[in-house]
């Protein structure tokens, strides 16, 4: 009985440790900084159909994060990192085609490329796609 309880505790600990070791990284196709932010807002207002970051359009309104996205982030229970392309390239020393969603679990692995993100029609479908890309928690 003691051995069974002890090994179950180890398995539970490993699962917990594994999930907490993973981080989702969202890279926006935009530069960081206040001037870039203002230019992005202007672009979203004047010509939203030509805005270059589909990930930003899915997760944010013109001025703020969408409420559904905020709730999803809080409910997921795993670390997330949100970076602009210049911040990502500086921190991780690599370039790619943006936007991009990656999984960091020791190494970096792309879980959604630009082409996939560009095809997503709305926030609900983005959330479904992100959940589908995550490893099983069972």
Image (cartoon, grey):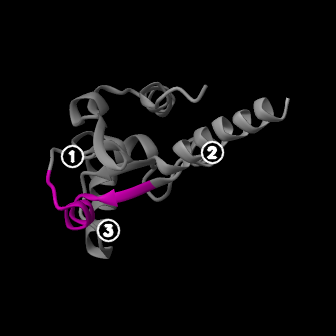
* Mark 3, secondary structure of its residue: helix
Spatial separation of the CA atoms under disc 1 and disc 3: 20 Å
* Mark 2, secondary structure of its residue: helix
Mark toward the start of the polypeptide (1 vs 3): 3
12 to 108, vertically: above or below = above
Question: Is residue 65 left or right of 95 when viewed as pictured?
Answer: right
Residue beneath label 2, please? 71
Q: Residue at x 46, y 31 (%)?
A: 134
Instruction: Say which quadrant the C terminus sits in.
Output: top right
Q: What stretch is highlighted in magenta?
A: 81-95
Which of the 4 quarters of the picture holds residue 71?
top right
Judge depth for marks 1 and 3 and give the one in front. 1
Residue 56 got which mark? none
Residue 89 percent across, percent down from the top left = 19, 61
Q: Quick check: is 8 in the magenta stretch?
A: no
Q: Which residue is drawn at 70% across and 35% down?
A: 7
41 to 73, vertically: above or below = below
* Mark 1, secondary structure of its residue: loop
Residue 38 got which mark? 3
Judge depth for marks 3 and 2 and give the one in front. 2
Q: Nearer the viewer, residue 101 or 59?
A: 101
32 to 76, vertically: above or below = below
Question: Is residue 58 left or right of 2 when viewed as pictured?
Answer: left
Residue beneath label 1, please? 98
């Amino acid at each position: 009985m003691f051995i069974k309880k002890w090994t179950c505790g180890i398995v539970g600990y490993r699962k917990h440790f594994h999930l907490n070791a993973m981080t989702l990284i969202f890279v926006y196709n935009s530069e960081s900084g206040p001037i870039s932010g203002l230019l992005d807002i202007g672009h979203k207002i004047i010509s939203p159909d030509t805005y270059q970051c589909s990930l930003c359009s899915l997760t944010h309104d013109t001025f703020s994060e969408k409420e559904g996205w905020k709730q999803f982030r809080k409910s997921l229970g795993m670390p997330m990192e949100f970076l602009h392309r210049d911040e990502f390239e500086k921190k991780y020393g690599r370039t790619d085609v943006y936007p991009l969603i990656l999984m960091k679990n020791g190494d970096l692995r792309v879980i959604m490329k630009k082409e996939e993100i560009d095809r997503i029609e709305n926030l609900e479908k983005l959330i479904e796609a992100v959940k589908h890309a995550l490893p099983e928690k069972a």
